[in-house]
Image (cartoon, rainbow, N blue to C red):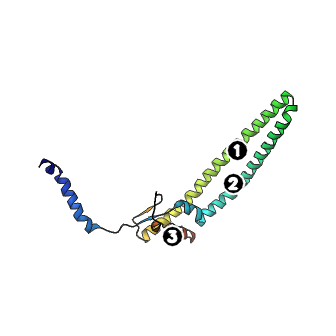
Amino acid sequence: MTSLSRHLPLVVLLGSLAAAVPAQAQEFKAGFVNTDRVFREANSAKAAQSKLEQEFSKREKELVDQGNSLKSASEKFEREAPTMSESQRASRQRSLADQDRDFQRKRREFQEDLSSRKSEELATVLERANRIVKQVAEAEKYDVILQEAVYINPKLDITDKVIKAMNSGNGK
């Protein structure tokens, strides 16, 4: 008897919830957006990628050229080192080490700048995609739209709708 009286409030609460659920039951509508696909397929994402390529192509070419030049100089040093005096060899090694340090610094700065700009561009695309997702959710009365999941039934995927809306210029 004491266990029933101890659990009576819980039993009453569960009973009232069970009675209320059928009266309150509505169809739950969920959707899913694959942001990776949005970043690959939406025109604004492709335009952002092209913009980044144009912005960074010159620096990238300069880095490739500098790397090739450094490699050639290093190979030439390896071939000529046996015939050099000790002071010439030490001087050339210092010069190559300085050039390599400069090259590594420039490459690191390039990667940091590229990564930063890529984040900025993708944030703009994602912001626009999120506005469109919200518009689709409101228009089609979704209760929840997920962007990441372990598994999604393909019938819940609204990525095509979002990409189509982005490409048509909606959600600006």
Percent x, y for residue 90? 81, 30
Helix, strand or loop at mark 3: helix
Three-letter amino acid code at disc 3?
Answer: Lys
Split into 4 quadrants, where in the image is the C terminus?
Answer: bottom right
User: At x 65% / y 48%, what residue is drawn?
Assistant: 111
Left or right: 89 with respect to 107?
right
Residue 98 coordinates in the image, percent (x, y): 75, 36
How far apart marks 1 and 2 lie (CA) works out to 13 Å
Q: Secondary structure at mark 2?
A: helix
Observer-nearest of 124 and 155: 155
Q: Could you tell me the amino acid type at mark 2?
A: Phe
Q: Are marks 2 and 3 in contact (CB under 8 Å)?
A: no
Residue matched to label 3: 161
> In the displayed structure, would residue 12 be above or below residue 162?
above
Reading the image, the residue beneath label 2 is 56
State which tag comes first along the sequence, 3 or 1. 1
Q: CA distance from mark 2 to mark 3?
A: 32 Å
In the rendered image, residue 10, in percent from the top left (x then y), is placed at 20, 54
Residue that protrudes farthest toward the top in the picture = 86
Q: Disc 1 on helix, strand or loop?
A: helix
Labels 2 and 3: the sequence-earlier one: 2
Res. 120 image quadrant: bottom right
Crowding at mark 3 (Cα within 10 Å: few <14, some 14-19, many 20+): some
Q: Nearer the viewer, residue 22 or 96?
A: 22
Q: Residue at x 11, y 49 (%)?
A: 1
Residue at x-position 59% and y-position 62%: 40
Q: Earlier in the sequence, mark 1 or mark 2?
A: 2
Label placed on residue 106: 1
